[in-house]
Amino acid sequence: MEPVRLWAAVEFTAQSGSTDALLGHAAQAGLHLTRIVPLPGGFRAHCAAWQYRRFAALARKNRVRLRLQKKQGLYFVLRPLLLRAGLWAGFALFVPLLLWAQGFVCG
């Protein structure tokens, strides 16, 4: 397993258009694609999530349709949790309560 997949990686398919030219332009741009599997009329590949936006721009220029198949990694698991205000409020209330209750246990 690549270390990138532990943090944030995406699996996608590229269909129609000039997929061969897209792979060439991606290599020239320095985008690292892994696990490239040929499909009828296109291919399936993996890349780091932070490179997908640049790859999608290249795909639009080459008129290739990209479909995101799977998001993998810790980033996509933690991101929805970080957006929940209730978790932050609970943490902000729990820490002072824990520090205050510590005086009853040790004293």
Image (cartoon, helix red, strand yellow):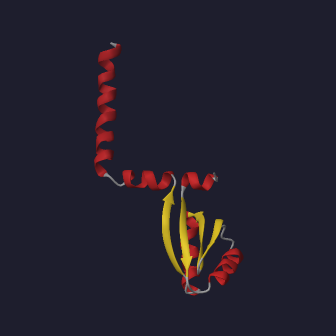
Q: Which residue appears farthest toward the top when viewing the image?
A: 107
Residue 4 figure quarter: bottom right
Residue at (49, 60) in percent of width and height: 71
Front in this rendered view, residue 58 or 44:
44
Total labels: the figure holds 0
Residue at (60, 65) in percent of width and height: 47
The answer to whether residue 68 is above or below residue 89 is below
Q: Which residue appears farthest toward the front when viewing the image?
A: 40
In the image, residue 16 lies at what x, y percent?
55, 84
Residue at (33, 12) in percent of width and height: 107
Q: As drawn, is 30 to the left or to the right of 97?
A: right
In the image, residue 29 lies at what x, y percent?
68, 76
Residue at (35, 14) in percent of width and height: 106
The answer to whether residue 34 is above or below residue 62 is above
In the image, residue 83 lies at what x, y percent?
35, 55
Front in this rendered view, residue 8 or 99:
8
In the image, residue 82 lies at what x, y percent?
38, 52
Q: As drawn, is 68 to the left or to the right of 28?
A: left
Residue 48 figure quarter: bottom right
Residue 59 figure quarter: bottom right
The answer to whether residue 91 is above or below residue 51 is above
The answer to whether residue 18 is above or below residue 54 is below
Q: As drawn, is 85 to the left or to the right of 69?
A: left
Front in this rendered view, residue 4 or 95:
4
